[in-house]
C-alpha cells in the first residue's frame, strides 16, 4: 500500500455505510440515556459508575463513527477500484500450482462474514498487490513457500 487513499469495493462501502447508520442510532440512544440521568436527583456510587460506563461507550461509538467517516471520505478521494492491477478493494481470481482456482476480495480489515476475503496485510494479500493478470506471485505460508498466478481482476 502506498499510503495514498485506497479505494473500496461497492460491497465494502455498503457494509461501512450500514455500520455507520447502526452506530449513529446506538449513539443517539446512549446520548439520550446520559441526558435523562442529568437531573437534580442525587444517586449512589452505582449510578455514578453506570453514568461513567455510558460515557465511555459514547466515546467508543464516536471514535468508530469518526474512523468510518474518514475511511469513506478517503475512498471517495481514491476513486473507483482499479481493474488493471490488484489493489485494496479488488476481486481477484488466482490459479494455484495444483490447477485449482479461487476468487478473493482484497480488503483492509478482516471480516468474518466474507469467507473469500484476504487482507492486504496477509501473506497472499500483500503478494497480490500491484500485480496484473498473468503475473506469478510468491508468498510464505506456515507450511513454507507458495505461489499463485493472477488469472483475472474484477
Image (cartoon, rainbow, N blue to C red):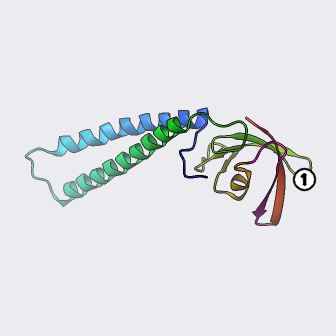
Q: Position of residue 143 (x, y in %)?
A: 81, 66
Compared with 85, 49 (above or below) is: below
Q: Does the magenta stretch include residue 140?
A: yes
Residue extending farthest to the left is 40
Specify whether 68 is left or right of 120: left
Q: In this view, does 80 lie to the left or right of 91?
A: left
Q: What element carries label 1?
A: loop
**Tag 1 residue:** 97
Identify whether 75 is placed above or below 118: above
Dividing the picture into quarters, in which one does residue 85 lie?
top right
Q: Position of residue 112 (x, y in %)?
A: 61, 47
Q: Residue at x 20, y 56 (%)?
A: 48
The spot of residue 18 in percent (x, y) is 49, 34
Q: Residues within 10 Å of mark 1 (few under 14, many from 20)?
A: few
**What residue appears at the point 44 percent right and 37 percent down from the top-left corner?**
20
Q: How many labels does the image show?
A: 1
How far across and how far down the image is residue 124, in percent?
73, 55
Amino acid at each position: 500500500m502506498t499510503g495514498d487513499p485506497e479505494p473500496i469495493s461497492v460491497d465494502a462501502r455498503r457494509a461501512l455505510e450500514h455500520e455507520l447508520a447502526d452506530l449513529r442510532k446506538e449513539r443517539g440512544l446512549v446520548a439520550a440515556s446520559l441526558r435523562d440521568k442529568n437531573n437534580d436527583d442525587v444517586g449512589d456510587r452505582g449510578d455514578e459508575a453506570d453514568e461513567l460506563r455510558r460515557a465511555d461507550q459514547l466515546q467508543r461509538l464516536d471514535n468508530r463513527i469518526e474512523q468510518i467517516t474518514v475511511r469513506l471520505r478517503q475512498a471517495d478521494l481514491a476513486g473507483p477500484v482499479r481493474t488493471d492491477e490488484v489493489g485494496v478493494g479488488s476481486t481477484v481470481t488466482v490459479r494455484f500450482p495444483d490447477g485449482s482456482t479461487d476468487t478473493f476480495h482484497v480488503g483492509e480489515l478482516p471480516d468474518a462474514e466474507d469467507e473469500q476475503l484476504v487482507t492486504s496485510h496477509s501473506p497472499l494479500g500483500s503478494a497480490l498487490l500491484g500485480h496484473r493478470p498473468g503475473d506469478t506471485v510468491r508468498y510464505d505460508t506456515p507450511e513454507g513457500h507458495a505461489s499463485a498466478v493472477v488469472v483475472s481482476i474484477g
